[in-house]
Image (cartoon, rainbow, N blue to C red):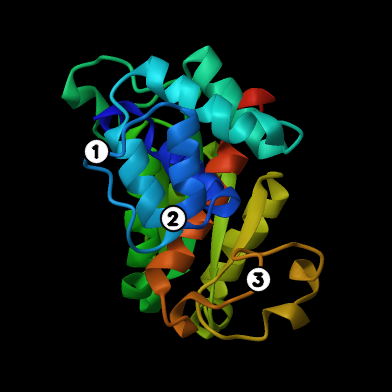
Amino acid sequence: MMRKHLKPVFYSRLVVKLAAFYPTQLTVRQVLINSEIPEGAINLQGSAVNMWDSVIGYVESWEMLTVLLFNSLSKYENDQEVFELLDAVKTGWAFLPELDEWQFLPGKVSKDTVKIAIINSAEDILDCSGLVKQLKVLQLEGLVEVNQVIVDFEPGSDEVGSYQKHIADSCIVLLMLSPAFFSAEDCLKQCFFAYKVKKLVVPILLKECLYGRVRFLKNIIPLPKDRTFIQSSPNKNKVEMEICQELALLSEKFIREGLCL
């Protein structure tokens, strides 16, 4: 199936976009007819995302995918994300290269890998694990490298310097905001260090807290953009996935503009 040869980030963005434009069984079926793709084993039941997941999973060749995207998205080319998706197919960026499977393991980074540091309190380590796991997909395709700065320093420890090196080497620094984060002096110190060395700081709303009253965070847009706290959401996985999608877009922008040096 073609899905196995698409980069995970491209695949998820494509399915979500198609589902937004063609949300019903009737509209999906019409795209298939226009693209001369037999319905065959495609499952047109369930949500729009499920239907398009089945469609993209069924597409067997680059040519078939190109026809499908032309018939479904070309009329929306003024949409910036649609333009980027179509361009990714034209340039080949959307596809995984034919490499040995070991080359997709985390840690196989390149000059175009965006380094992300995550700052969280030791108290929140389990609650951060969902987002860290979601980020593994971006690591597998070599888009990001993640270093988690779990703040729980022992007196006399040299971990402070080690963690600050992770932050200094990163392009993006995620602040996992919670009451524990703000009550941990060392979390705030690492946060201020990130500002000092001019990193892009992105607040992540982990647990309910009065982050909006913190002066240095007032003008920064957090993730999720709808300001839902991850741990208060009935669907944590969905919220964490959406955060990762935003981070993927941000990382791709860093690479395009040559900012991940």
Above or below: residue 169 compared with residue 27: above
Please, what is the three-letter code of the amino acid marked with disc 1?
Gly
Image marks 2 and 1: residues in contact by CB distance under 8 Å = no
Q: Which of these two is toward me, 208 or 40?
A: 40
- Is 105 left or right of 8, judged from the image as shown? left
Residue beneath the point at 54% across and 15% down: 90
The residue at which mark 2 appears reads as 25
Label 3 neighbour load within 10 Å: few <14, some 14-19, many 20+: few
Rendered image quadrant of residue 83: top right
Residue beneath the point at 74% across and 68% down: 217
How far separated are the C-alphas under marks 2 and 1? 15 Å
The residue at which mark 3 appears reads as 226
How far separated are the C-alphas under marks 3 and 2? 29 Å
Rendered image quadrant of residue 142: top left
Rendered image quadrant of residue 210: bottom right
Please, what is the three-letter code of the amino acid marked with disc 2?
Gln
Label 1 neighbour load within 10 Å: few <14, some 14-19, many 20+: few
Above or below: residue 75 compared with residue 117: above
Label 2 neighbour load within 10 Å: few <14, some 14-19, many 20+: some
Task: First in sequence, mark 3 or 2: give its number.
Answer: 2
Task: First in sequence, mark 1 or 3: give its number.
Answer: 1
Q: Position of residue 153 (x, y in %)?
A: 40, 68
Q: Residue 40's mark?
A: 1
Residue beneath the point at 24% across and 15% down: 99
How far separated are the C-alphas under marks 1 and 3? 39 Å
